Structures are given as C-alpha cells and as structure tokens.
Image: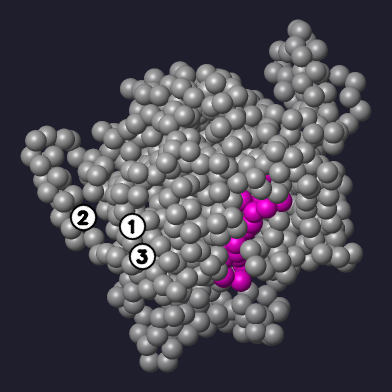
Amino acid sequence: VGVPHPASRLVALALKPDCIQCLQCLPILSAVYNTYLKYHFVSAFWKEVADDFFWKKPATGPMLQYNFDVTIGNIYVKCMEGAKTNMCYNVLDRLVRERNLGEKVAYYWEGNSPDHHMAITYSQLLSQVCRCANVLKKMGVKKGDRVSIYLPMIPELVYTMLACARIGAVHSIVFAGFSSESLCERIMDAQSSVLVTADGVYRGEKLINLKQIADEALEKCREIVTKCLIVKHHALRTKSGAASNIMTDFMSGICSLFWCVQTPWDSECDVWWEEVMRDSPEECEPEWLDAEDPLFILYTSGSTGKPKGVLHTVAGYLLYTSLTFKYVFDHHHDDVYWCTADIGWITGHSYITYGPLANGATSVLFEGIPVHPHVGRFWEIIEKYKVTKFYTAPTAIRLLMKYGREPLYDLSSLRILGTVGEPINPEAWQWYHEAVGKGRCPVVDTFWQTETVKHSYLTLNPHLIFQTFPFFGVEPTILNEHGEELEGEAEGYLVFRRPWPGIMRTVYRNHERFENSYFKKFPGFYVTGDGCRRDKDGYYWITGRTDDMLNVSGHLMSTAEVEAALTEHPAVAEAAVVSRPHKVKGECLYCFVSLKDSREFTHTLVEELKRLVREKIGPIATPDFIQNAPALPKTRSGKIMRRILRQIARNEKDLGDLSTLADPKVVEELFSQRCEAA
Ligand code: 6R9
C-alpha cells in the first residue's frame, strides 16, 4: 500500500488469503493504516483527543513533557500542565448535560445470584455520586486526602470512586479478596482517613464477612482512619443464590436481621452508608483539579515484597483510558460492553469505570463468579444483556473451557472479544475464538500493566493468533542483558522508549523506588519487567515475567511477599517460591521450605503454611505445592538459584550449567522429593 514503514504489515496481514484476488478493501485498509500512523506518530493528535473533554482552564504547557533517563535527572512525566479539569465531571456531567445521555443505562448490575440485578442510568449515577461526595465531605475528606475502598463489585464501589474523583480525594481501592493484613498495610501506606466497606458479600456460595476483616485491619490503624462507612449489602440485598421460595426468603430475612444486629459496631467510627446517604444533597460542585493532581493510588506487588502504591493523575489517565477503550473495543453508541475483571484491579479501574464512562458506554457490572450458580453463568449474562463486547482473562477462559460452551445460550450479539492479564495459550485462544466468538469476532489481546494503565499492545488482526501491535504513541523496543537494542528477530527485555499520557507518575511517597524499579536497569527506558520476542514479521510476543514475580490467574504477586509469609511460621527457617504451570490459573505457587532443626515436615504443617499465606496475603496467593527442602540450591555467594527450583518444580531434568552452585548434591535430593500432585 505504499507506506514506507514496517508497520505496513498491519495492513498486509489483515488480508485473508483470498483477498489477494479481490483487493477491493485495500483503499479502506490503507486509510485505516494512515490514520493509525497519524495517531501513532503525530504528537498533535493528543490535542485533538483532549478537545473531546471539558477543561475549566486550558493547558499552558505542551501536551507531554518528560525525562526517562535517570543519568540526566529525576524521572518525570507531565501531561497538559496548567490545565484544570475534573474526571467525574467529564465522565458524568458532560454526558448528562452536554450530550443528553441522562436516560442511557451506564451499568446493568448483576449480582452474585441471578435474582439480584438493577439498571443504573447516567443521571442516577450522577446523583448517587454527588450524594456520596457530600457524605465524604461531611466526614472531613478534602482535596488530596486518601480514601481506602474495600468493597465488592457493587454499584456503591463505582459511586465511591467517582465521588472521590469529584472532590479531588485520592481513592485507594483494595481488592475485597485481600486479607486484613494486606488491607491494613495499604491503609497505612496511603494514610487514608476514611475506609469504605460493606457488611458482607457472597462470592459464589461463600460468605465473606468484610466488616470483620475491615475491623481486624483497623485494629492496627485506628489512629489513621477516623471514619468507616459501611454499605449494608449482605443484610439488604444478598442471599446464597439458592432457588427462592417462601421458606428460604423467610430464613434469609431472619439471617439478615441477625447479621445486622450482630455486626460489631464502633459508634465513634462506624457509619451505615444508607443512613448518611438518605439525606445527602444531590448537588455537589466538582473540585477543579490541576491536570497533574493525583486521581488514585492502586497497589501492585513489588519484587521486594512490599506492595507499591502506583499513582495516576487526572488528565493523562482520562485521555488514555477513554481513547484505548474507544479504539480497542471499537465502541459504538448501542454497544453493551462487559469486562469481567474486578474493579479492585487496574483492569476494572480503567475498563469498567473510567474508560467506558468517558465514552458514554453501557456496561455490565458483575458481582459474581463464572461458575455460580452454574457453569453457564457468563453465557447466560451475555444472552440476557445482549453483550456485544466481552473482555475477560485467560484464566477464566481456561476454567470455562473445561466445561465446554453450552449451546443453550445465544451469543450471537458478540462482536469483539478481549483478553488481558497474562499470555494467552493457543488452546485457550482457539476455544475463545471458535466456541465463544464462533470464528466471527476478532480477539484483542491487550498487554498492559497497572503502571502503564493502557493497552500498550493489542492484536488487531482477527485471523492471526498473538501478534501484537503497539497502541498509538507507544514505542517498544527489545534490549539484551547489556542494555543494547536488538533489531529484527530477537528475544529479550521489553522496554518503552517514551511515555504516553496515562503512564504512572510515581510510587506513592517513594519516588526513589519508582526510579529504581522501572528506570535504573536500562537508563533512558521504562522497563516493563516482561520478556518479549519479536518474530520475523516484526510482531511482538510477550513471553512472561523476567523478574521475581508470579502471575497467578492474572494476578501479579512477588515471590518475596509469599516467602515472607511462609517464614513467619515458627517451623520455617527459609523459603523459596517459584511458579509452576497450571491448567486453569496459568501459573501456580510451588514453595520450597527448609525447616528449623528438629521440626518435622507433616501434612498438618503443610496445611498450616497454606493457611498462613492465605491469611497474610489473601486466598489468591494460596500455594498449590509445598515441598520440604532440607537445603536450597545456592550460589557460592549465597543467592538462591530460582532457575533451578523452577526446573525442579516443572520436572525439567536438563538443568544446564550448575557450576555456580555451592553444593550440586542438593539438586538431586530436591528432585527425589518433588511434589507430583497438589
Ligand atoms: C492489566 C494487568 C501486569 C502484568 C504484565 C504481564 C502480564 C498482562 C498480558 C500480560 C501477556 C497479556 N500481562 N496482560 N502478559 N499478555 N495480554 O494485568 O496489570 O496486574 O499490573 O499485571 O501482567 O506480565 O507485566 P497488572
């Protein structure tokens, strides 16, 4: 098509083999491709993107300023300096007032039980958000204050985060599956003055007492948190999801009443959401913030074990989540979009709340799990709401693959399928494409991170698996161990050469850690921590983490964090954790523990250790395998050789060079005791 850039392969590869005869679509593809180039390389286009939104004051500085080189000075990224705006105004008021979308459904909320559901329009959302914003203000929350949110996937979660955005408070959402310790650690780091939680929630058949977990967390941070706002969700809305009849309704009524009465209460601090929201006014003037004011903190695992508070700012995040949503999911006004992630993770922040709302989209907000009350729940919801765009994770696809796609449900509304969270294996891709998308729907594989907030890469091509192409403005490259850029077919460290508006700005209260984690290893580049291969056609394939991180069911955690939990047990002297492939989770935890003298490795100890990790971090970190390791393979300088442990866990006998090992006999012994089954 005469475009002198290697990216022209995008067009070439988008053609099916029989296109070679017809070529009628070439002018269209060529136009699409030229637009891609313009968006990708012409910086003026940021200005065009910004024009869609409301700015109380225009920018005085350029669209983007940055330094990515630690050897020159501090790392910084600034977008639209001098501009003033408000995220909440842009995603709600602008649509209700300027675009007349008040009556449009913003969310179809679908509860854990199919009996619970509701539709929320944009104007209803705006009024709930304003009321919540006034409640927070009354509790003393001001611009710049942090609010921790520990809520399940209920509308109040969206109301609270947008209420924070409206008044300029910084939300810090903690996934409601995390333990009290994890919650406490995040509250302390963020120094949040308010915690918002719920009485309890059913996840599938399991009741989780959120208030009790929150209370345990608050025990250690009472002097920081002055108010705890509690949504009466379990008591008012939920049942176990069992078929409803007079008897079960009566019983659940009694249980709810009992639950309310028995909820532990600290009258100094605790406030029921329903009580304060009832009389709260529906008008709340937005706080006009600087473009670079913080919008939220979201904690992600760090390789040293302590979670990092990734900080994002208002203007850049608005531009990027809205733009990526619009193009990656080819958003149309009549779409019904569903992202199955939890808002407690970045995918939910960007692609359940901010990105879809900024585009005036209608989304499904789902509280439950894929297999409750039956394994066809996802398909049932797609049919019920006629979902057109569906975004999920490989781990969910692999889980559902096990049961096969029930033909009972009509999925003909689907137009685009998306995946995120970890590399998708060919089998899962194939099944997603054929059984779910019936071969008609493009699968967009979106690689990105809590830190990058946006789809750094995506597959635009429905006919080919995996190949990924950088999103507008993203310039990836591959480096070897010495930091040299690799050309052509190559494998190495995936890095980015320049920023885009939505990249993280700092680690909250620890800018040094931000620079050390992402910019020190290869000065001049943002280091993703992922490995990557470029094939002969110039496409990028993400190969997985290159650091001490594990990706279990799409959730990142650090080996150090799990090891720290294990070594808290009095019987454990040392622990080393590696990943082992898992059919559904992608990766699972395989832990080696060395016990203190005279301690015995028993089944009870294994169970105790699993419980300990669950309590310290949360159920997602529960180890699948725990192996007794009388000694660990170490280098002469005392470093644990995780590469070898990984190979033992995976039963890979070809261990390569063991010359740096202090005692090679250790390896044989560990091999002989390896766990076969969980
Ligand atoms: C959005 C999100 C980020 C890490 C990332 C990488 C892995 C995410 C992926 C993928 C291959 C994809 N990852 N999406 N790997 N293909 N499509 O998951 O953010 O929780 O911060 O995890 O997840 O390893 O570096 P986060």
- Residue found at the far left of this picture: 247
Location of residue 610 in the rendering, given as x and y in whole percent from the top left corner: 38, 69
Query: Which residue is label 3 attached to?
Result: 269
N-terminal of the pair, mark 1 or mark 2, is 2
Answer yes or no: is residue 9 visible. no
- Residue at 72% x, 23% y is 14
Q: Residues within 10 Å of mark 3 (few under 14, many from 20)?
A: some
In the rendered structure, the answer to whether residue 110 lies left or right of residue 429 reads left
Task: Please give the name of the residue rendered at 26% of the width and 42% of the height, measured from the top-left corner.
Answer: 237
Specify the amino acid type for callout 1: Val
Q: Which residue is mark 1?
A: 271
Foreground disc of the pair 1, 2? 1
Marks 1/2: CA–CA distance:
13 Å
Q: Secondary structure at mark 2?
A: helix
For label 2, the residue is 260
Rendered residue at 29%/35% (across/down):
116
Amino acid, disc 3: Cys
Instruction: State the separation of the CA atoms marked 3 and 1.
Output: 7 Å
Under circle 1, the secondary element is strand
- 453 to the left or right of 357: right
Q: Nearer the viewer, residue 321 or 289?
A: 289
Q: Nearer the viewer, residue 42 or 597?
A: 42
Q: Position of residue 401 (x, y in %)?
A: 42, 37
| CB within 8 Å, label 3 to label 1 | yes
User: What range of the chain is rendered magenta?
Assistant: 292-316
Q: Residue furthest bottom?
A: 598
- Check disc 2 and give the amino acid type: Cys
Q: Is residue 111 above or below residue 437?
A: below
